[in-house]
Amino acid sequence: MTRRLYHADSYLRRFDATVVAHGDWKGQAAVVLDATAFYPEAGGQLGDRGTLGGASVIDTQVTDDGQVLHLVTGEMPAIGATVTGELDWARRRQHMAQHTAQHLLSGTLLDRAQAPTVSARLGESSLTIDVTRDRIPDADLAAAEDLANDIVDDDVAIRAWFPDAGELAAMKLRRDPKVDADIRVVAIGDFDFSPCGGTHCARSSQLGSIRIASAERYKGMTRVTFTAGRKARAELFARDGILKALAQQFSCSPADVATAIDKLRRDVAASDAEVTALRGRLTTALVTELLAAGTGPIVAAVPDAEMLRGVAAKLVAAGRDALLSAPDPTGTATVVGLLRTPGSTLDCAAVWKRIAAATGGRGGGKPDRADGRIPGPVADWPGLVAPLLTHP
């Protein structure tokens, strides 16, 4: 079995080892070493990347029987060769921070929110903890987050080791071990003791900060999404940049952005109400004008696609069949609506079929109602439709 050097030193980033075998992981070439500092994906933590001699290690995995596979591209080192492995340290350092943060937050969620952890996933894009409790109040989440950051600020020591049977029996572990032998324990000060084979920081201050981003119901439990370490810092800086940009747009301080947005929302609501009222008045005026223009089906172009249905409905209510068009919001096509009054013999579906055939339009409907879309604007809608109004 490959000796896992990170068990003794999670900060080892460069090492020498001997290639003992070649392998394969889902079609990807892999190398087996007699010793490695590369952590294989397990326990929610992703596998390490880096280099191995002249090859790139794109992932590290472990087989069911415990064999560590270094998935490589490039020059495959020969069996028996001594190679130098070097970790992608920025990636490993973040994985250590977020894994330790998960332990700490799981401990504080249990302590402050009575929410035991079921599983955790420390992915590339999101970090999540699933806990058994459903509907955790915001106050409990805030208390767990505050306690976690208090322990970060206290800069407590973090220890990972293989205790003997007597020492292990005396410990109050947060969860039961998943193995029966060679149980490794990670202790965050005197606060949290958990069985774990992963890589971790040496002190709590190296986490920087822990932030709960969200909590949502998930399969009868709660999924807590969090961030920590460099990832948390990058997200904080990015959001700070967005906030400053918004403040510049609103000509206010970052602290006043929320107030400025609330004012903008009220202004937009007032404008929407005014536009709705004006649209109603315009619809009424347009319907009055169309009804006064003559008898028979009304064929007209209206200025706005949102007005089309309202105008058509009012015309039908007044006892007139309506065949209307309007430019779509992009101005690149024409929206069409056909509606008939009760008792009318106009077949809207048949008329639309003739219009579509003549214009390349798409749509459909029933005898009493049809609608569709014609490519491009129509300059003379009445002139286009009038010849098509005869019943087929």
Image: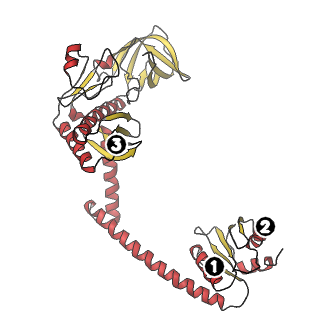
Q: Amino acid at mark 2?
A: Ala
Q: In the figure, is residue 166 to the left or right of 310?
A: left
Q: What's the residue at 28%, 44% (across, down)?
A: 211
Identify the residue under disc 1.
312
Q: Amino acid at mark 3?
A: Val
Q: In the figure, is residue 176 to the left or right of 24?
A: left
For the question of whether residue 142 can be seen, the reply is: yes
Of helix, strand and loop, which one carries label 1? helix
Residue 344 point in image, percent of width and height: 74, 81
How far apart, in angstroms, are the residues tagged by discs 2 and 3? Answer: 56 Å
Identify the residue under disc 3.
224
Residue 345 point in image, percent of width and height: 77, 79
Relative height, residue 38 to residue 144 (above, below): above
Residue 230 point in image, percent of width and height: 31, 38
Pointer 2: residues within 10 angstroms few (<14), some, or many (20+)?
few
Of helix, strand and loop, which one carries label 3? strand
Quick one: label 1 or label 2, which is nearer the N terminus?
Answer: 1
Q: Residue furthest right?
A: 392
Relative height, residue 244 to residue 331 (above, below): above
- Picture mark count: 3
Q: In the figure, is residue 388 to the left or right of 254?
A: right
